[in-house]
Each structure stands twice: as structure tokens, then as C-alpha cells.
Image: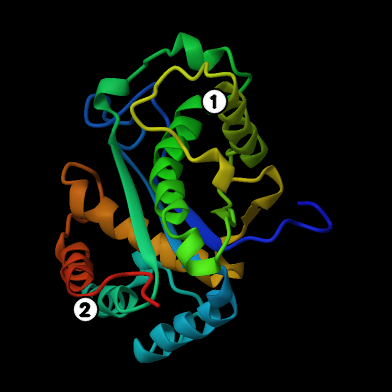
Amino acid sequence: MANNPPEYGYIAYIDEAGDPGTRRVRPIDPNGASEWLVLSAVVIRASREPTVKTWLSNIVNHLDIRQRSDLHYRTLSPTRKLVAGQMIAQLPLRGFAICSNKKNMRDYKNARASKIPSQQWFYNWCIRLLLERVTAFCAGRTMADHGKQLPVKIEFSERGGVRYSQTAAYQYYLKLQQEGNNIYLKKREPVTKMLDWHLMEAHPHAERAGLQLSDFVASSFYQAIDCLGPGEWDTAANQSAKADHGKRGWLSP
């Protein structure tokens, strides 16, 4: 990241559940990668960045979690998952989730994507789909919120094997394609004016409260849809969060 990063109006905390492997995929291959890949983003106004730790502390304290200070979906009991989901749904944020079923991607080769030097084209592609939604949402609000156009800061939850510099470079490549009117898929595109190369970072899960909220979003969707996986299939926490979301407008003033 640059020593003097640009001013930003929003932060998108991004995490995932499942894995991006496509060579072998469950349940077609019993020992393959996960059937689903879920990418999530929790978006807040930049002005709320100092309060995210307080939000998380309130949730952890309310759940009476004593063994650890961070929030991790998979370590919670079913009752705590429901309560945490209800509390997160009341916060002034916006949650996004992209859910990709990979069975039809098994051993798929994308000739166009492979032209871009990367060992993680599928992950980068799914991040594009997520950022299409995130940047469109923020672009539609930035003038009302800030009186000027301010980009989105992206914070990824670090995962072994993922090169986030390649992910950032992929988004920059899309920007160049757009500027040359040479982008291949035009039905929906990232609003690249809302992205900045210098505002993309990766951090350990435990070091960012916002990433722990995004972990909850990704994992709750994953657990709700992965009915054939080795883990527990449970739609309750996901349905609870969506029900509360319907009552309130996330990212409220």
C-alpha cells in the first residue's frame, strides 16, 4: 500500500468459505475441492471504521465467548450463531455474498482468462463478480454520502495459497479493458472508478474486526447451501440474518 493512500469513502471487508479449486470437485469427486465457493463483502462507510472493533466486542461479550477474543463462525454453537446473525443484521452495514456452485466448473479451462498471468483465475473471476455489486452500490451513494466521488478500500482476509497482488492486478487489467472499450463481458462490469490499486490490502482474520463480520456472512451462506458437504447443513443463522435485513436498510445513516 502507498505511504499516502488516496482518500476513501467506504471499506469492503472480503472473506470466503469453501475453496476455489476446480480440478476435482465434490460430490463428483469424493476427495475433491468443495462443491461451493462463497465470497462475501461487508461494506461500511469509512467514517465508521473506528467503531467496528466496538461492534465486534459487543457481539463477543453478548455471546459470553471466553475462550477467544475474535469471532469465528465455525466455532459458535447453533444458538450463538443465531444471536450473532441477528446482532450483525442490526448494524449499519451492507452485506454481499456471491455463491458459486463449481460442479459445472470441474476441470474447466478459460482460454481468455488464462492469457492473464495468474494461478488463481477462478478466484479472481469470482472477486470480479463480487466487486461488480459492491462498486455499483457505493457508486450510487457516494455523492449523497460524501458530496464527491470517493473510492472503496478493499481488505481481504488472508488465505494460504491466494496471491492478492494477482487479484489486484486482475482488477487493474479490467480497468484497462474498459478504458479501451475492449472488455469481453459487458452485461455487468465493476465500476472501476470506485477502485484504486493502492487501496487493496490483505490482513489476518484475527487482526481486523470487519473481516470477522465478513467471515460470518460467508460461512452462514456456505452452511445454508452446502447440503452435500462433509460439514453440518444448517439454514437457520442465514435465514435469521436475512429476516432482520428485510426489516432494516443496511448501511443506514
Residue 26 vertical placement versus 53 (above, below):
above
* Residue at 32% over, 69% down: 250
Residue type at the position of mark 1: Gln
246 lies above or below 26? below
Q: Position of residue 19 (x, y in %)?
A: 41, 40
Query: Which label sits in the foreground, 2 or 1?
Result: 1
Reading the image, the residue beneath label 2 is 79
Badge 2: how crowded within 10 Å, few (<14), some, or many (20+)?
A: few
Residue contact between numbered discs 2 and 1, judged by CB atoms under 8 Å: no
Kindly identify the residue that appears in the image at 40 percent across and 69 percent down.
93
Q: Position of residue 185 (x, y in %)?
A: 40, 21
Disc assigned to residue 38: none
Vertically, is 57 above or below 166? below
Q: Viewed as shown, does residue 165 lie left or right of 102?
A: right
- Residue at image coords 50%, 75%: 70
Disc on res. 178: 1
Asked if residue 97 can be seen in this view, the reply is yes
Q: Is residue 67 visible?
A: no
Instruction: Where is residue 31? Give x, y as percent.
Output: 32, 31
Using residue 199 as the reference point, say whether residue 107 is left or right of it. Answer: left
